[in-house]
Amino acid sequence: MPSAVQIASLFRKPLDFLNLVDEIPLGIIFLDQDLRVVHFNKAFEALSGTRPEKFHGVECCYLLRGAACVDNCPVMIMGSNKRSVSCKSDMITMERQKIPIRITTAPVLDSEGSISGYIETIQDIRTTEQLDGLKSTAFSFANIVGRSPQMEKIFQTLPLLAQTDTSILITGETGTGKDLVAEAIHQASEREAGPFVKINCGALPETLLESEIFGHEKGAFTGAVGSKPGRFRLAHNGTIFLTEIGDLPLSLQVKLLTFLDDRIIYPLGSTRGFNANVRIVAATNRNLEDMVKEGTFRKDLLFRLNVARIHLPPLREREGDIRLLLDHFFNYYRTKLGKSIRDFSKDSLSILLNYNYEGNIRELKNVVEYAVNVTSSSAIEPASLPSYIMESVKDTLLSASRQFHKHDMGNRHNAAEGSSSFPQKHAGGSGHSYAGSDDGLNDTAADSGLSPQTWPEIQRKMILDALIQAKGKKNDAAKILGWGRSTLWRKIKKYHIQA
Amino acid sequence: MNQAARIMFHKVAIPIKKDRIASRFDLAAEVAIIEFSEELKVKNKKIIVLPGSSPDDLSHLILSENINTLICGAIEEEYFQFLRWKKIVILDSVVGGWGEAFDRWQKAILRPGDILCERTVEGRTV
């Protein structure tokens, strides 16, 4: 057993190596070239329940007692690569407890670059494994929320795809959660402990992007005063996420294609390749098939990236998810901002549920954040919603109202022709004639021919329209509006409508 | 109980991998079974190759073969307690060749956690 090992030349005075490794709260095992135990630190001692003296010189598989030692020894996977490898496994401790672990094995190289031995870090992942179990419950996977059939299908597919090592292409409109899905794939994969490196292919000019992605050697171009590893190298043993892949210039598409074929990257100005073990996840909101037809995206690159495709549906196609997401973000921001808001009011909820979220979840999230921030009462009222939403809802309602009137007037005209019993004031030529007599409504904006300006006015008009259509029958009017009879009655009272 | 009485009518099982005791009971795909005769001699020695590694199947085999002693590497508490409840003597966390482990067991000097293999670091015995 080594008793006193020192590290010289790092600090002014030599350091006590064994004490140094004992301070690290992660199990570390040092092995020789034949995978025999040289030493392990206090953290591994605590995890395994044995002492270094007992296993000194013994093959590591008898110390670690891991499933990976039997099935696929990390050192065997590494081969002559001299690069670290990481894998999930389990081990049985001396107390006969089976615990999930993550093993990361790296070679220990001497000054000439030859392998002298190996260093293994053993991470107890019991806590994260438990959290993983909780993560995929309650209408969500990782941080993705949804219970629509479309999302359920994705939740079922994602863990399966994550476990494979294939390239994945994520498509979907802006704000649908492509980044979140990419990260969730990485977190649920075997590469979880490795880095997750994101590159926005549309964010940098072509020349900078090449150096950013593939790296460069010192002196490769004017201003290259030092070497740069590049994102692919940084993502070694992890996942690289190429977002906005549709914006990748054609010249770099070729270089990426070469990498996907032989898995070796050549930094700018370097003749020495680097064998990068990375998984590629790409995303775009553009239609790559159309881009291929236009000649702006390489067909062969599309085929290589499109091994598995995940299409994220826009929010408008996700039945029932708007309410779920509203509640989700409402709770999140209410807690974050320490507000005592109880809920959405019925009016604001009705507006939010009927709004067409072109920016998808990102827009919905922003709307809720804004509303929670500006609300000072116990519920989020329509006045607390961003003004552009009110404008949009007004436009929608007005256009719907116009459509309704056109249709309604046509019907009434036909009815009037067929039956003389239809009240004269309802059969008038004007779209607003229903409010023009002694029913107490002649002071409305609708009556004056102006567009309604506020939500109560819009709602009042909707009630009146429905009542007219239902010929005064409240039950039928409630059905037309999609409300309960009591809701209609309450609103009639609220808006002083004499129905 | 003397050594002769201990060995009489005895059956020993050792989950193995080639000539070594398997490092994990639950992942062993072979098991050596040694049976003694009334004359205190090894009556039968056989190696059973399992269709796959399964701690449940291995436990079932141990029970169906009427094993009295199990010599193994790492074993989970659940299986350890179950087999002990079935009156099987377990010597676990044993490291080394299974032949040597068996010899030591015959001499009644094998203990749980014994490391019987050669210890070397960088080719030198330590």
Image: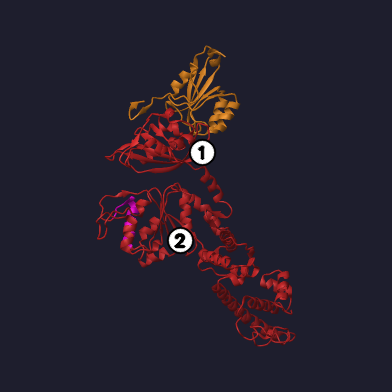
Chain colours: A red, B orange
Which residue is at the front of the view, A204 or A369?
A: A369
Which residue is at the front of the view, A55 or A16?
A: A16
Alpha-carbon distance for marks 1 and 2? 38 Å
Quarter of the image containing the C terminus of chain A?
bottom right
Q: Amino acid at mark 1?
A: Ile
Which residue is at the front of the view, A167 or A490?
A: A490
Residue A254 visible at all: no
Residue A423 placement (x, y as % from top left) = 73, 85
Return the residue found at the far top.
B39
Q: Is residue A205 left or right of residue A393?
A: left
Crowd class of label 2 (few under 14; some 14 to 19; many from 20; radius 10 Å): many
Q: Amino acid at mark 2?
A: Thr
Q: Quick check: is A259 in the magenta stretch?
A: yes
Q: Residue at x 49, y 64 (%)?
A: A175
Label 2, on which residue? A171
Q: What's the mark number on residue A86? A: none
Label 1, on which residue? A99
Residue A254 placement (x, y as % from top left) = 32, 59
Q: Is residue A418 above or below residue A136?
A: below
**Discs 1, 2 touching: Cβ within 8 Å:** no
First along the sequence among labels 1 and 2: 1
What segment is highlighted magenta in the picture?
Answer: A250-267
